[in-house]
Image (tube, rainbow, N blue to C red):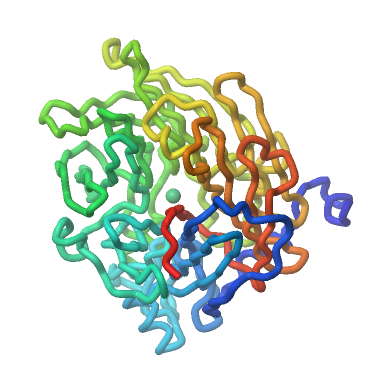
Amino acid sequence: MVASEINTGKSYDRLDWQGGYLSQPNEYNYSVENIEGEIPPELEGTLFRNGPGLLDIGGVSIRHPFDGDGMVSAITFQGGRVHYQNRFVGTEGYLQEKAEGKAMYRGVFGTQKPGGWLSNIFDTKLKNIANTNIIYWGGKLLALWEAASPYRLNPATLETIGLDDLDGILDTNEAFSAHPRIDPDPLTLVNFALKPGLSTKINLYEIDPSGKLTRRHSHTVPGFSFIHDFAITPNYAIFFQNPVSFNPFPFLLGLRGAGECVQYQPGQPTKIILIGRDGSRDSMKILETPSGFVFHHANAFETPDGKIVIDSVCYENLPQVEPEIDYKDVDFDKLSPGQLWRFRVDLTASKVERELLEGRCCEFPTLNPEKVGRDYRYLYIGAAHDQTGNAPLQAVLKIDLETGSRQLHSFAPKGYISEPLFVPRAGSHDEDDGWVLLLVYDAKYHRSDVVILDAKNIEGKPVAIVHLDHHIPYGLHGSWTPQVFL
Ligand code: CO
């Protein structure tokens, strides 16, 4: 037992946790030699990760990690060997600020240019930081950020090619969300883009594996929206419109970032928006459920009796850091934890029922890609070490939705995890035949590990732990592709 546990009774130590929020300004490219265990030879492909690489600009701390410049990692598995490479996305803003050595843009989550409010007033120009997700689709590697177009990278070198309009699918610098969903049958990338305002325009896109647009339609819903993610079934695209309002004045006056002007409206219902994927005009339906805030959905599916089930990570309110507090000093105990809920939508009766599936603090769900939009049995999700309370994510939880049984693999007290990803074994038939891959920040050595867990037995000893030579700051999202680009 470490001193921090004796002192606080907690599974984590704040100073340890803060280490994962130090900038990583270096770009690496090396074959990893420090490996515990054996890399399964049949695990072949590339794990791409994206997230903020710089948590300060010119030595001045950014206001929120969501404002950090995107840094992409490619971890390549081939023949039992591992290669690591990372690069910053060469966005216009990153290159400008690197040249100047100071912040030139305001961040959506409150990072300001130096010089106080006078330097920031009426500057509504946003920096596309391309830091939220990274996918390989239609022969292109794309770094995604929800408020602008993707940046395309070279998958072998991670060099930035430039802003990409997906061969004309997007208008110049049109938004494209960072949370595409891949429908396994027929294999299709489904994504959305939001144009928020007094009402919200939702664009939906479906793109085949060659990169060709197969469907596009737009819908308008009443009210301002802050929608980060969505879910799909074979027939529906599903959005949760969180009960929030937007007061633009502190942003326009240079006092706050736009994201800080989103205000949670307690007591107002969350709206569940279902849009028919076929795009027919009368296909949109809106239902209400009790108040809550959702960033991420785990999955959705249609039941044989015509109901629609959606599993989502819900917060009692929008987890925001007080304007005067550094995010690294946030009081975890004062924020409500994310918890996993199941919503059952009955369109015929216009009714929604909800049920708490998992009360443990959790975030970043993943599942077998063959089960996206389908009834499924196994969910894997980042979780806190302890059963109750709000805390940093230090564990992976596997939930058997059929039997209710749980398996937990905790990296506490020194390990802090990022989003887990399930990778199926090629040719597998069992839903949980594969691996759970994740990055774990090890505060003891101030470095990150790539950990491979056996998805059938995540409680067991990891299949392999790949020790990197350095740390990777806590990331956001990533993806797996069976391709090798080296
Ligand atoms: Co997200």
Task: Determine the residue positioned at 44% across, 62% down.
Answer: 484
Q: Would residue 109 be visible to someone looking at this image?
A: no
Position of residue 244 measured from the top left corner of the image (x, y, whole percent):
37, 42
Where's residue 21, x and y in %? 60, 66
Q: Is residue 486 above or below residue 325?
A: below
* Rendered image quadrant of residue 113: bottom left
Q: Would residue 23 be seen by someone viewing this image from the given angle? A: yes
Please tell me whether residue 180 is drawn above or below residue 241 in the rendered image: below
Instruction: Locate residue 126, reporting x and y percent.
Output: 31, 68
- Decide which of 11, 214 is in the foreground and name it: 214
Frontmost residue, 219 versus 117 = 219
Q: 435 left or right of 287?
A: right
Number of dots carrying numbers? 0
- Rendered residue at 27%/43% (across/down): 188
Residue that lies at the very extreme toward the left in this rendered image: 281
- Which x, y percent locates residue 423? 51, 45
**Residue 121: which quarter of the image?**
bottom left
Q: Quadrant of the C terminus?
A: bottom left
| 351 w.r.t. 373: above or below | above
Depth check: give the residue in front, 471 or 117.
Answer: 471
- Choose top left, top right, bottom left or bottom right for residue 371: top left
